[in-house]
Image (spheres, rainbow, N blue to C red):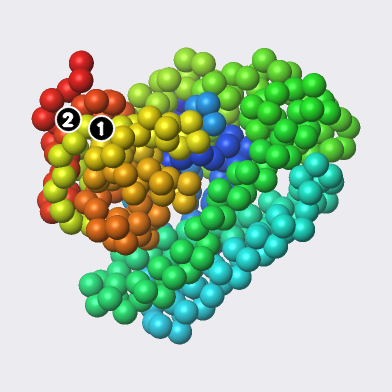
Amino acid sequence: MSYTNFKKHADWVKVWSGRWSFHSDVNFGYHWTVMNKVAGKSAYKQIIYIYKNGITDCWVSEADKANLGKRLIKVYKDRKNIKILADTLKKRAKEIFDFIESHDPKNITKKDYQAFWRLAGEYYLPHLSVKYIVDYFSPSQLKKFLPILEDARLFSEPVFRDIENFMEDIAKNIAKKAGYRREQIISTTTDEILKYFNHDKLPDKKSLSERYKKSAILVKQGKYWIYTGNQTNKIDNILLTQKTSQLIKGSIAYKGVATGLVRLVIDPRRDSSSFKAGEILVTGMTRPEFLPIMKKASAFITDAGGILSHAAIVARELKKPCIIGTHIATQLLKNGDLVEVDANKGIIKIIKTCH
């Protein structure tokens, strides 16, 4: 499929951003567009992943996302069903915690691998439902149901970190046996890893390294297309040119105003040591491993996320200004930019650039 097909939508929105491997993208893309159904329809019709050096940005059509929200509201419309949804999320999360605790990634078999990703896929629908439904609640529904869903989100928050860490450990073991690098193994597809378990065969190292460096994945009805090189850059530009305004806007997660220097943190494992107290944290999305940085930051800005995103929950706990869902903050803001975060209005104003 040609990259020009992406121009059919002018409403791409970033719904996820952070440490999520190419391998995970393919697995979850399949579940999003085939297995995970809400009111009889797949969660999304199609998804675009932009993958670069271990970090993923996930884009969907705005209309597709809104349609999912409307269906979720119809399915989970009373306290009983909301409680069932929250309990299901906790149950699925515990299944993954238990699996990881009881399995050594150095000794994973094909059967174990398939069971692991089956559990991860089953987890994702309640996760997706809990995370997104709150953005479509009426004020009265939000008041009634937010505490129930927030409790479930807090319990399950480590799941994706644990999934990625476990898969990376599996990749390290395969890489050691096959003479590859970890980065190359986590840039494989599900089918390619299954072939490895069956025949000890993997794609050539060069193509896997190209994927890791930068690639795009289109997932549509369970099928996927992989793009590398110049085509990936063109797809990236199509997504980003939908949001060209210099005025950065987002959704308010916690009100307040803060002024400070921007500090981009894409991977806290790598970037946390340079973060100074009082700086403005700018990132795709946050996870539990961001917490030490968030305690030092004066405000948070994210590309993606909703009311029950990790950044929003922590902002409410720490009472720090937070603007989420900007889609483009990490592209427009640079380290050292002086900005005002007006979380009363949901606007980020660039006072002075660092260049």
Q: Looking at the image, is 5 positioned above or below residue 30?
A: above
- Residue 248: x and y in percent read 19, 37
Q: Which three-letter amino acid code belongs to the residue tagged 1?
A: Val
The Cα atoms of the two marked residues, 2 and 1, are separated by 6 Å
| Amino acid at pointer 2 | Leu
On-image quarter of the C terminus: top left
Q: Report the disc number at residue 183.
A: none
How many marks are shown on the rendered structure?
A: 2
Q: Which residue is mark 2?
A: 338
Tell me if I can see residue 36 in this picture.
no
In this view, the residue in front, 191 or 116, is: 116
Residue 305 position in % (x across, y down)? 36, 50
Q: Badge 1 local density, few (<14 within 10 Å), some, or many (20+)?
A: many
The image shows residue 344 at horizontal and vertical percentages of: 13, 53
- The residue under the point 59% across, 34% down is 22
Q: Secondary structure at mark 2?
A: strand
**272 relative to 124 in the view: left or right:** left
Q: Could you say which is closer to the camera, residue 292 or residue 348?
A: 292
**Quadrant of the image occupied by residue 327:** top left
Residue 124 lies, in percent from the top left, at 55, 57
Sequence-wise, the earlier of marks 2 and 1 is: 1
User: Which residue does the image show at 63% across and 19% down from the upper left?
Assistant: 209
CB of mark 2 within 8 Å of CB of mark 1?
yes
Graded by Cα atoms within 10 Å as few (under 14), some (14 to 19) or many (20 or more), the crowding at tag 2 reads: many
The residue beneath circle 1 is 262
Q: Answer left or right for 97 relative to 84.
A: right
Residue shown at the point (78%, 34%) measured from the top left: 173
- Visible residue check, residue 23: yes
Q: Quadrant of residue 262?
A: top left
Q: Is residue 292 above or below residue 273?
A: below
- Relative height, residue 162 to residue 174 (above, below): below
